Image: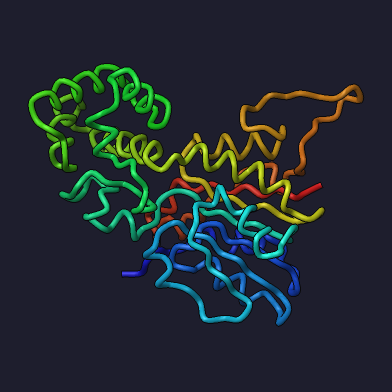
Amino acid sequence: MAYHVPVLLTESIEGLNISPNGVYVDLTFGGGGHSRAILEKLGRKGRLIAFDQDEEALKNAIDDSRFMLIRSNFRYFRNFLRYHGIDRVNGILADLGVSSHHLDSPERGFSFRFEGALDMRMNRNARLTAQKVVNDYPVEELARILKLYGEVQGAGKMASVIAKARESQKIETADQLLAILKPLVPFKIQNKVLAQVFQAIRIEVNREMESLKAMLENSSKCLLPGGRLVVISYHSLEDRMVKNYLRYGNIEGTDSKDLMGNRPTPFEQVNKKVITPTEEECLANNRARSAKLRIGERL
């Protein structure tokens, strides 16, 4: 099975508006699908710097003198670019969320479809695991995470039931957690709710919202005027942050204007309406269904 099938590949590469001799950044290398498509557009003097925090992604590195792969969370990408003598770039691409490889690896614990340890770390050297979140977080914090990051209905009750269950036995596997949660959810919506719960825990484990905020703020500092930021998101929290930053210059969506009535945003939205996959792509790749693509051009 492929490491990861790139979503909205044609649309995202077109969105970068690639200059053959430009410098580009792929913040979520994964299986390298987007990176390979970028390299096809670059000339001999073009450069591509890719990032991925998962050590397993390094196995997919591309043998090309124009290409560099750095193992790091993308929140730190600006520091690494500056270390390598790169101050400004022509385009930045980020395909957010979790890869097919992660979801299909039972031992990584990202999916409730498999029996496996509650891990969910994209960087396996990180200290915080899903097991620690489920077993050690205070019930109020657990409820906050489920509600904020998973938009789970009845998050408070669910957190209380988890806290009660862990008193008698440590919750170490996905199956143990499912056995606790399933009686709380009507059968018709079980898959949806369980996906929301696992999403919430995964976001907390990997500090995904904090990383996205840092990435967005650094992108405006790194892009040349006319450079493009292309972001593919998979749930409403991510998409809202990206939309707010491109529209207002902040992730909160605060519409502040100067004395002349202008918004202090560093970007102009290239696509006023969000781009979504075609029906054909969704049929070919089920995980494309929730994808949303937004493009901003640096002013």
Quarter of the rendering containing residue 206: top left
From the viewer's perspective, is 197 left or right of 283? Answer: left
**Looking at the image, what colour scheme do you see?**
rainbow
The answer to which quarter of the image holds residue 216 is top right
Above or below for 156 versus 58: above
Viewer-closest of 278 and 138? 138
Work out whether residue 81 or residue 140 is closer to the camera in this orientation and state it: 81
Q: Work out which quarter of the rendered image holds the N terminus and state it.
A: bottom left
Q: Residue furthest front?
A: 83
Residue 156 in view here = yes
- Residue 209 horizontal/vertical position (percent): 50, 37
Residue name at image x 19 percent, y 42 percent: 174
Which percent across, then down, holds residue 139? 28, 20
Report the number of discs.
0
Q: Nearer the viewer, residue 182 or 203?
A: 203
Q: Residue at x 59, y 50 (%)?
A: 231
155 vs 211: above or below: above
| Residue 59 in the figure: left or right of residue 268 | left
Q: Residue at x 13, y 37 (%)?
A: 176
Q: Position of residue 158 (x, y in %)?
A: 24, 22
The image shows residue 151 at horizontal and vertical percentages of 39, 27
For the point 66% across and 63% down, the residue is: 14
Vertically, is 290 above or below 167? Answer: below
